[in-house]
Image: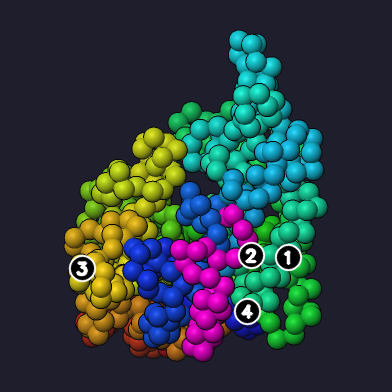
Amino acid sequence: MNSEQHWWQNAVVYQVYVRSFADANGDGVGDLAGIRNRVDYLAALGVDAIWLNPCYPSPQRDHGYDVANYLAIHDEYGDMDEFDALLAEAGDHGIKILMDLVPNHCSNDYQWFVDALAAPAGSAERARFYFRDGRPSDDGADPHGNPPNNWMAAFGGSAWTRVAADDPQWYLGTFTPHQPDFDHTNLDVQQMFAEVLEFWFDRGVEGFRVDAISPVGKDANLPDAPPVADGTDMLQVTWENPFTVFRPEGHDVWRRFRQTINDYMERHPGRDLMMVAEAYMNGRPDLMAAFVNDGQFHQAFAFDLLLSPWVKSEIERAIGDSLDIMRIGSTPTWTLNNHDVQRVVTRLGRASATDPNTVTNNALVVRDSNVDVDVGERRSRALISLAMALPGSLYLYMGEELGLPEVLDVPADRREDPVFHQTNGERIGRDGCRIPLPWTDDPTSAFGFSTVPSDASAPEPWLPQPEWWGQSAVTELDGVEGSTLELYRELIAARRDHATPQGLVAAVIQLGDGLVAVRRGDLAVVTNVTDTAIALDMSDPHLSIATPVFASEGAEMHTPGVIPPDATIWFVS
Ligand code: NOJ
């Protein structure tokens, strides 16, 4: 693939975690009006699209990934008129909107599930989900006292919940008991999701990030999972289950979704709709190819780079594997952050980040608070400067342009993530990357997150902000030479001017120890992943007639033969 065919192939997409972006009505919770008020900020950053985390009605037990109504807006966030206003405002700035679709499960408050609980075993209502009879209890006293199989939930405990002590049946929830899994072989479910896609396309949404694709589609017999290897983390067990992860049955679901999208585009010429899959397929380019193709997903996140330690060979492998997707006519979808992982500044600021055997993820597991934030920020700046040069699209997570670190010390009684609660606090969960954004250094307005009506007192944001939060506020970085915010703005412009025009072909090249380098047309991008400066061999054919056009540590642009520690330079020949 050499030429750009679709807007999303090169897009910079900005992920908005709605609850934490901007609060326009002063209740401590982010909302759609807050986003609308900040569209000019996003436009000035230079993004092409916004991905909204789920903003449908939800009891918020997994902050929107427990949908109670797929066709409306959560009341804390606004209403459909506000949604339309946001779409219009974004459209006026040339910014598209992507929604988040959650097909694996709904909320246990979703009417279909409420109906299913009220209906008997074998009913049409229960057939939309996975209800199965339990197995006899260990002492034999209860014929249905044990779950139907041994599957474990992704956020802790059994994946099964018994309907009631006098009901023989249990239901399956891959994540939590509040998120019952749909059975996508059921026709009602199939039709419902087709309607949901069309409903939002009709409003003007340009595509969907599709949540948790790996457990969609299961072995119809739901057999016991084989034992996992000793030492497997308790929250990893679900993802080792061959009867529910990346099943062939899942492909049928995505083919139907794609057909709905294709049919819609056929009826609406000019629309260029897409869906991007969320699944951790790291180290499995073969899997990526099985899901990203003309019949299924347009894109899938290349999480390899996000998970990579700060090690040359690992970063090279992550880039090489992800570029591999171009072999089958697609483009990679890069990202360094999202609402499920610890922020990159923190991940790369740990001493363990240079250990080749470390997976720098994972919010669910890592508690280590021994972080050198300065080192982490420098490495993240170098890494985003590398990622911005690569072909494919790039998804940014709100606040990464401010260089925000993870907030690791959210008090236990303020933690909201079900991961924390389902594991009885054994895992700290993901609240630390979801802290409401700092827009100003004024703590009386939750650092500018909340618009406080003049007759009201400052609201308590839904997650507490640390007292030092204002240091990274937009107002503190805006216009400041060398700030991370200015770096992102420059990078997005440099990407447009120097990277995208180079086309879609790129490859990892070798320029020496400690250097990760990529060649894309006339552009050579070099990252020093060590803590000492490295002098480049400027006679290397990749560099001999090259001029530096961008550097993650600006002042070093003037000494182009040397790459400072943890820095990236772009050269154009
Ligand atoms: C992945 C989402 O990104 C995460 O936030 C959510 O908890 C799970 N899927 C379940 O929907």
Q: Earlier in the sequence, mark 4 or mark 1?
A: 1
Q: Is residue 374 above or below residue 353?
A: below
The residue to which callout 2 is attached is 71
Q: From the viewer's side, name the closer residue of 375 and 22.
A: 22
The residue to which callout 4 is attached is 204
Give me the C-alpha separation between circle 4 and circle 3.
Answer: 37 Å
* Magenta segment boundaries in residue numbering: 67-96
Q: Is residue 87 magenta?
A: yes
In the picture, measured across the screen, residue 349 lies left or right of residue 163, that is: left
Question: Which numbered circle lies on residue 444?
Answer: 3
Give me the C-alpha separation between circle 1 and circle 2.
Answer: 9 Å
Question: Which numbered circle lies on residue 195?
Answer: 1
Among the 4 quarters of the image, the one containing residue 44: bottom left
Give me the C-alpha separation between circle 4 and circle 1.
Answer: 14 Å
Question: Which numbered circle lies on residue 237?
Answer: none
Among the 4 quarters of the image, the one containing residue 517: bottom left
Kindly check if marks 1 and 2 are in contact, taking CB atoms under 8 A apart as contact: yes
